[in-house]
Image: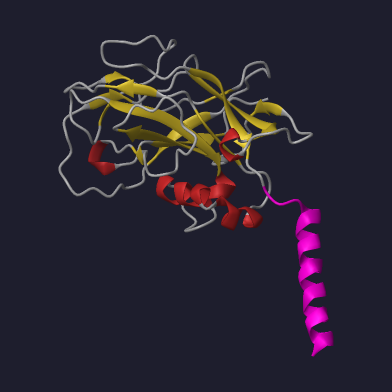
Amino acid sequence: MKKLTLTIVCAMAMTGAAFAQGYVNWNIPTADVTVETNAQTFSPLFGGGSTGSGTVGLTATVANGFYYALLTSTTVPTTDTTVWDGSWTGAAGNGGVAMTAVNTTGLTHGGVAPATVNGASGTGVQVNWAAGTTQSVVLVGWSANIGLLGTGAETWVNVSNILANWSTYQSSVVGQAFFGETTIGSVNPTGASPGDTLFATSSTPLATGTPIFSLNTQLYLLPVPEPATMALAGLGGLGLLLFRRRRQ
């Protein structure tokens, strides 16, 4: 088993205004957030239910196999069943760079605990909302084969569009596709680095918000058409075509 570490991915975010002076601590310690892939359960965001087989365990250690993005919202949702519906946006840090991370091939983990989500910068990151303004935050993760669809970009803008239109894209997925999210937190950024805490070893509210504490975060399997179903659909279409030709 391998431990996954994450490295920051620099993707320019589109902004139309100057950046506010709020700072947060963009660091994801092993004790705060860990991640597993769950092939036994379909994503509850798409109806859930048992897959009838599969395993739950460490995310694969292939570099760039999983991507993560920090999202923010001006509302404080108690539940989150459609994270892609536009109520959440990708958080932007210094210079408009999206606050995202990607797994690398990590160190030996011992096969006991879930793979870790860490390696992000431990320094303060200036965010795109004002100091003293509270926003909700959540970390989402997905398997790289999802981002290959649509525009072929591993960005939240692309991935959220794919998820919102999953019935259109699901038949094009190669392999198993996973998506999941941590618990929801909140943060009220300070005006100086290193900034307020995004992640902590407890979800106990702080003066600056409620940090994300999400061990064993599940990246659930997304539903895709079974090969047999696709084959039947193809045969059905062929039969209809032959029927039409005979009538002609």
Residue in the picture at 56% in, 37% down:
45
Quarter holding residue 233 = bottom right
Q: In this view, does 103 lie to the left or right of 226?
A: left
Residue in the picture at 81% in, 55% down:
228
Quarter of the image for the C terminus: give it.
bottom right
- The answer to whether residue 154 is seen in the rendering is no
- Tell whether position 243 is magenta: yes
Q: Choose between 149 and 134: the one closer to the eye.
A: 134
- Tell whether position 229 is magenta: yes
Residue in the picture at 67% in, 16% down:
112
Residue in the picture at 30% in, 17% down:
209
Q: In this view, does 94 lie to the left or right of 10?
A: left
Count the marks. 0
> Residue 241: percent from the left, percent from the top?
77, 78
Q: Choose between 200 and 246: the one closer to the eye.
A: 246
Q: In this view, does 226 lie to the left or right of 12?
A: right
* Residue 10 to residue 139: above or below: below
Q: Which colour scheme is used?
A: secondary structure
> Residue 52: percent from the left, percent from the top?
79, 34
The overriding secondary structure of the stretch rendered in magenta is helix
View extreme (front): residue: 247
Q: Give the range drawn in magenta.
A: 224-248
* Residue 160 to residue 193: above or below: below
> Residue 102: percent from the left, percent from the top?
48, 37
